[in-house]
Amino acid sequence: MLHTITVIQFSKMLGNLSAILDKAETFAESKKIDMTVLLNSRLSANQFSLISQIQISCDTAKNAVARLTANVESMPKFEDNETTIAELQTRISSVQEYLAGFKEEDFGNAGAERISQPRWKEKYMDCATLRL
C-alpha cells in the first residue's frame, strides 16, 4: 500500500509536472516570453518561484520514499542551482528513476515511521496520514 501511495503517486505527479513544463516552454516560445522570467515567476507574492516549487516537489518525493524505506543514503543530492527547463527536467527524471528502483517489499515496517522535513516545522506524516 505505501508503495502505491508514495512511489506510484509521486511518479505520476512528477510526470505531470514534466508535461506542464513542456507546455510552458512551448507557450513561452510562441509568445516570445523569456523563460528565465517565467521560471522565476510567482503566482502570489508570498509563494516560491516556479523553480523553487519544482525543486521542493522533487525533494518531497525522494525524501518521503527514502525515509519510509530507510534508504536515505541512496537518495540523489541536488545543489538547487537549476535555472533552465532542461535542468529542471533532468532533476525530475533523476527523481523518477530513483523512485522506479523501489518495490512494495522495500517498505517493510514503514507503517510505523513518521517522516518530516525541516520546512514542515514540527509537523510530520505517518501511515495514518497517508491512508487512501
Image: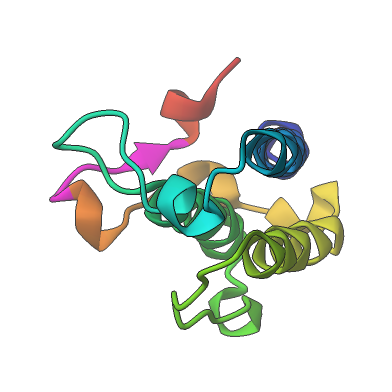
Q: Nearer the viewer, residue 70 or 92?
A: 92
Does 99 sit above or below residue 16?
below
Q: Which residues are magenta?
A: 121-126
Image coordinates of residue 30 in percent, x first then y, are 71, 35
Q: Residue at x 82, y 47 (%)?
A: 104
Q: Residue at x 71, y 59 (%)?
A: 89
Does 29 sit above or below residue 91?
above
Q: Residue at x 77, y 40 (%)?
A: 15
Q: Residue at x 65, y 59 (%)?
A: 85
Q: How many marks?
A: 0
Q: Is residue 88 left or right of residue 22?
A: left
Residue 6 visible, this orientation: no
Q: Quadrant of the C terminus?
A: top right
Specify the principal SS of the magenta part.
loop
Q: Which image quadrant is residue 65 in?
A: bottom right
**Residue at the outermost top position:** 132
Image coordinates of residue 44 in percent, x first then y, are 22, 29
Q: Which image quadrant is residue 47 in?
A: top left
Q: Which image quadrant is residue 66 in?
A: bottom right
Does 74 sit above or below residue 84?
below
Q: Quadrant of the N terminus?
A: top right
Image coordinates of residue 100 in percent, x first then y, are 85, 57
**Residue at the outermost front position:** 32
Image coordinates of residue 54 in percent, x first then y, are 51, 51
Residue 85 visible, this orientation: yes
Q: Nearer the viewer, residue 132 or 44?
A: 44
Q: Nearer the viewer, residue 122 or 28?
A: 28
The verdict on residue 117 being magenta is: no
Q: Nearer the viewer, residue 130 or 98?
A: 98
